[in-house]
Image: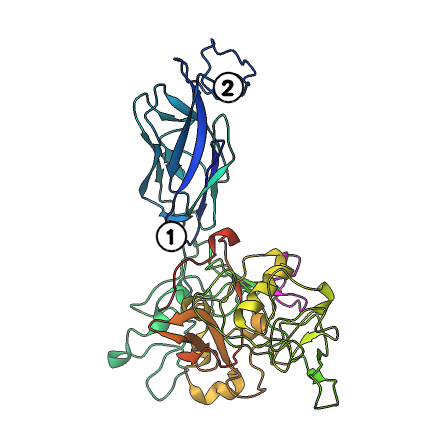
Amino acid sequence: MHLKKLSFLAILLLSLGLTGCGSDNLDTVSSNNSDSTGDTSDNTSDNTSDSSGDNSDDSSGDNTYTASGNFTPKIIQRGQTFTFTYTLDKIPDVAVDYAITISGTAVQGSSEDYTISNVSTLTFPVGSTTTSLTIQTNKKGDVYDARTLLLTFTGSTGDPATLSLLISGNVNLNDTGMTTYSDTSDFTLTTQASGNYALQDAAYGLDVIINSDATVNNGGDSQDTSSVFYKNSRDVDSLDPEYKGKAGFRFVKIANNGMPVTANNSSYSCVKDEITGLTWQVKSQTNTLTNSEVDPALPAKYQMAEEPRYNAANFSYPWEASALSGVGPGWHHGSPNNNNDSFTMSTDPAGFANSLCGYNSGYGDRELALYCASGSYANETNFLKICGESNWVVPTVEQLRSIMNYEQVNDYSTIATDKHALDKTFFDCATEDCVINNNGVNGSIYWTSSSVKGAAGLAWCVNLETGNVQTCNKQEYHKVLVVSSNIPSEFLNPTTDDAE
């Protein structure tokens, strides 16, 4: 990419991240004189000391330099030093300067988020074709969310170029949800047995540390009332509007407008996990798919009972990568009127639906092709900007496992009543068919975005009834639960295989 002005934006996001490498080019103009201040005034005289990139018609004394560097997204961890090197295409006979403007939510300082070697100017010295910029990120125990640092480098001419960096902050993980003990015959003991039955899961981790309702056992962890995640008596009371969930989980319901609502509110579209920072779209109850075409010789005309509810728990999908997650071959099921191709207004005027799933046709055709497929479901959620977010993806294995309460499946005789390992208050509905809908085989299995390494036709999936992680053929039809993080969508476009 050839650029006529040096002005690139470095976005450093303290979050989970991706890595990448690559290069880009950017140009600037320098006059053959001794002043390289970067002055962008209107003085156009060749006899002045301005080398900022004179834009007058008389530019016979100017040199154009092309700088190149790595402009592809890269992860940066806290507590590390990173140096970014830039190179000119020829030896400069004067110093070449670029002004730096710093903005964003990250705070600069030795005891803050970061320090930077070049606070106001990036300079290529006389006779040198290389220069660098160094950023030191600092460890901070009180930072849990994404923060931005915007570095705008401005030269005299050309178009902008963008360097996007991703810096991970402090990431917290959920505990297992186990709050009871076992002596191999009873799995519901409230205190830990001694001897061979000591050191059990329920005595350790966030399920004890931040849970005011937990039983503290000798030798185990103690409660930490000073923790920012500590759950008080209201947070652990399932009948209280401020209820946060069982054990060490901290969930908050989110309405479609992005605002939090109380735990007893039934009008919500998402759930925010305050421990991990992830937000999950919730499923809705059964949405019947009906074929209105009575002539079996003609293409089917499927319609949803309630067209806006594309997130119904009875809908299922084969595996396919989305625009933001997943890499590798996949499958989709499309329009019965369009040779299994995507749903469109011209081919599906009766509605965007088939025997497996449906979408709201009221919005017309989309920029991305619309199918019954796991990735297409995620794309649709971004198109609709559910809960105000536009970076929805099919989760990884560990993301999906992070919201599972393993106490819900520790005794398989209770599956009939527990149904699944997610918190019913937040992820299910009153009819208890918004996570698992028994509409056929594998009604409790949900896709992840991760392909199986060495087996292009397989992907990892999770059984929310048993807690098992297993492999599934990508042509099988399973459920999809999508997740949003504090990673902006521009960092999520996959460039490498995420197979595990």
Residue 469 visible in the snapshot: no
- Which label number is shown at residue 405? none
* Residue annotated with mark 1: 19
Residue extending farthest to the left is 195
Q: Is residue 107 magenta?
A: no
Secondary-structure class at tag 2: loop
Say if mark 2 contacts mark 1, CB within 8 Å.
no
- Sequence order check, earlier mark of 2 and 1: 1
Please provide percent x and percent y for residue 136. 34, 38
Front in this rendered view, residue 150 or 60 = 60
Residue 399, by quadrant, is bottom left
Other-residue count near label 1 (Cα within 10 Å), few / some / many at <14 / 14–19 / ≥20: some
> Residue visible at 47% across and 57% down?
493
Above or below, comparing residue 68 to residue 441 in the picture: above
Amino acid type, label 2? Asp
> Residue visible at 74% across and 73% down?
349
* Residue annotated with mark 2: 54
Q: Which residues are magenta?
A: 251-269
Q: Main secondary structure of the magenta part?
A: loop
Distance from disc 2 to disc 1, alpha carbons, whole Å, reads 38 Å
